[in-house]
């Protein structure tokens, strides 16, 4: 069984988030991407920022992380986007199987 992961990133607009989400699914790098409106508080270039953002929860396989990261880095507007991978330790077997079916193997030429 493949190892599965959730990758998180944030965007400054819903339009950018939807474009990234659709692109990741179309490229078969993600089986599903959920978008959630959030409020972020963070330090950037010496000042505290408080901004609305859209959190993307990207369901994929761990072996696709490098490709997911590269896709986000290429298409993201932030200078330093959040891109973190969290392993899925356990999950409903039929759902994990669906992720396998939706995410192309790295060596699959689309």
Image (cartoon, rainbow, N blue to C red):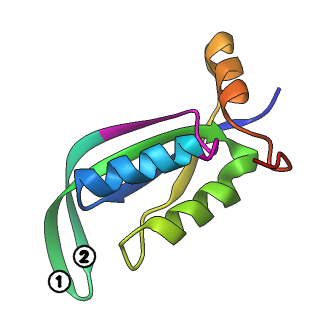
Mark 1 to mark 2 CA distance (whole Å)? 5 Å
> Does residue 3 sit above or below 46 in this rendering?
above
> Does residue 90 sit above or below 6 in this rendering?
above
Residue 6 appears anywhere in the view: no
Residue at the right extreme of this rendering: 107
Quadrant of residue 101 within the rendered picture? top right
Residue at the bottom extreme of this rendering: 46
Name the residue beneath numbered marker 1: 47
At mark 1, the secondary structure is strand
- Image mark for residue 43: 2
The span shown in magenta is 27-35
How many residues crowd mark 1 within 10 Å: few (<14), some (14–19), many (20+)?
Answer: few
Residue at the spot 42% in from the left edge and 68% down from the top edge: 81
Name the spot of residue 17 as percent of width and height, x first: 34, 52
Residue at the spot 21% in from the left edge and 47% down from the top edge: 38
Residue 19 appears anywhere in the view: yes
Disc 1 and disc 2 in contact, CB within 8 angstroms: yes
Left or right: residue 47 versus residue 60 is left
**Relative to the observer, which residue lies in front, 105 or 92?**
105
């Amino acid at each position: 069984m493949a190892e599965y992961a959730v990758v998180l990133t944030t965007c400054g607009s819903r339009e950018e988030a939807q474009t990234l989400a659709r692109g990741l699914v179309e490229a078969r790098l993600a089986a599903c991407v959920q978008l959630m409106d959030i409020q972020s508080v963070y330090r950037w270039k010496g000042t505290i920022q408080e901004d609305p953002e859209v959190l993307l929860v990207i369901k994929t396989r761990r072996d696709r992380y490098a490709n997911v990261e590269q896709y986000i880095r290429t298409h993201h507007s932030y200078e330093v986007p959040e891109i973190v991978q969290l392993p899925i330790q356990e999950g409903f077997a039929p759902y994990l199987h669906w992720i396998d079916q939706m995410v192309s193997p790295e060596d699959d030429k689309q």
